[in-house]
Amino acid sequence: MSARASQLPGPAEALADRGDGRTPAVFLDYDGVLSPIVDNPSDAVMTDEMRRIVSELARRASVCVVSGRDRAVVMELMGLDDLVVAGSHGFDIHHPTTGRITHDASTGFEGLVEEVTREVTERAEGIGGTLVEPKHASVALHYRGVDPSEHDRVQRLVDDVLAAHPDQLRVTPGKFVHEIQPKIDWNKGRAVEHLLDVLELRGEKYLPVYLGDDVTDEDAFTAPSIADGGLGVLVIDPADAEGRETAAAAVLPDVDAVGAFLDGLAR
Ligand SMILES: O=P(O)(O)OC[C@H]1O[C@H](O[C@H]2O[C@H](CO)[C@@H](O)[C@H](O)[C@H]2O)[C@H](O)[C@@H](O)[C@@H]1O
């Protein structure tokens, strides 16, 4: 079910309505949730204060990070290596003690991703302001720094790449970024469901909570465990909330509010 973001309550109110005292199983997106959106992706380093909050929460509850980023990159930006992290939009999942967490969609596309990353990198060199971000299981073409008059060229580049691999690739939208991925039925929502199984977080004891800010996070908000009985929290600037339909059940306005919410969770 989708709602206008501007009409949703804060998560504390949404949780009070549920009033069930379950232990949260927390799933966190990275950019726009644990770190504010900035011009250069490599500048999105998590603050010491957010690191403290997330680490302390992980002592009280299960915490997994589910990011569009390459797993190694998001771990470095967080400065934490003791959390379960699902990188590349949930394709590449790692547990700090047991190692790689496999799933049906996790292998078989490495060569294609490498080939497409090369192709995108070569073609993007001709468009000023683009930034190519290679990942384990996808490639991101950023255009935040591209003059708006050139956005069509960026779109054409992506369309051409997709047209050359119509059955193998898809593109997911983001904030001034095109994410080119294998065309596989896997996303952040599937990753959350998989993690709930593998980490044995199912049952009436647990409340699955997912915080995200982007279009790809809607896959997690609509995942059965979040949509039915869990809690999806959209992080969105109130100025943008009127124009955003979401499957989340609650909203927070910014990264600071995320910190305050996580700090108070499971106490
Ligand atoms: O799923 P997430 O952890 O939220 O990652 C989504 C994408 O985030 C990054 O790009 C976005 O944030 C950048 C830093 O604030 C910003 O410069 C960029 O315009 C945004 O699109 C990241 O670079 C991507 O790889 C992620 O897929």
Image (cartoon, rainbow, N blue to C red):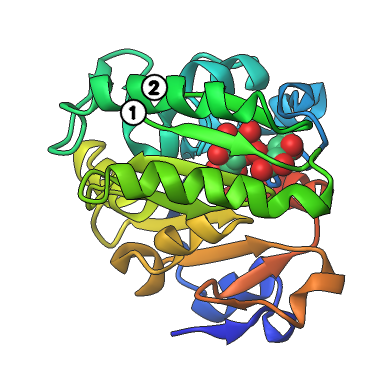
Depth order, front residue of 116/66: 116
Question: Could you say where residue 154 lies in the image, as x and y percent from the top left?
Answer: 63, 45
Q: Quadrant of ligand 1?
A: top right
Question: Could you say where residue 244 lies in the image, as x and y percent from the top left?
Answer: 67, 77
Q: Is residue 25 visible?
A: no
Crowding at mark 1 (Cα within 10 Å: few <14, some 14-19, many 20+) = many
9 displayed left or right of 114:
right
Q: Residue at x 68, y 46 (%)?
A: 33
Q: Are marks 2 and 1 in contact (CB under 8 Å)?
A: yes
Question: Could you say where residue 134 lies in the image, as x and y percent from the top left?
Answer: 50, 22
Residue that label 2 marks = 136
Question: Could you say where residue 87 lies in the image, as x and y percent from the top left?
Answer: 43, 30
Q: CA distance from mark 2 to mark 1?
A: 7 Å
Amino acid type, residue under disc 2 in the picture? His
* Callout 1: SS: strand
Amino acid type, residue under disc 1 in the picture? Asp
Q: Residue at x 37, y 40 (%)?
A: 181
Residue that label 1 marks = 92
Q: Residue at x 52, y 65 (%)?
A: 232
- Where is 113 relative to 143, above or below? above
Location of residue 94 (image quadrant) = top left
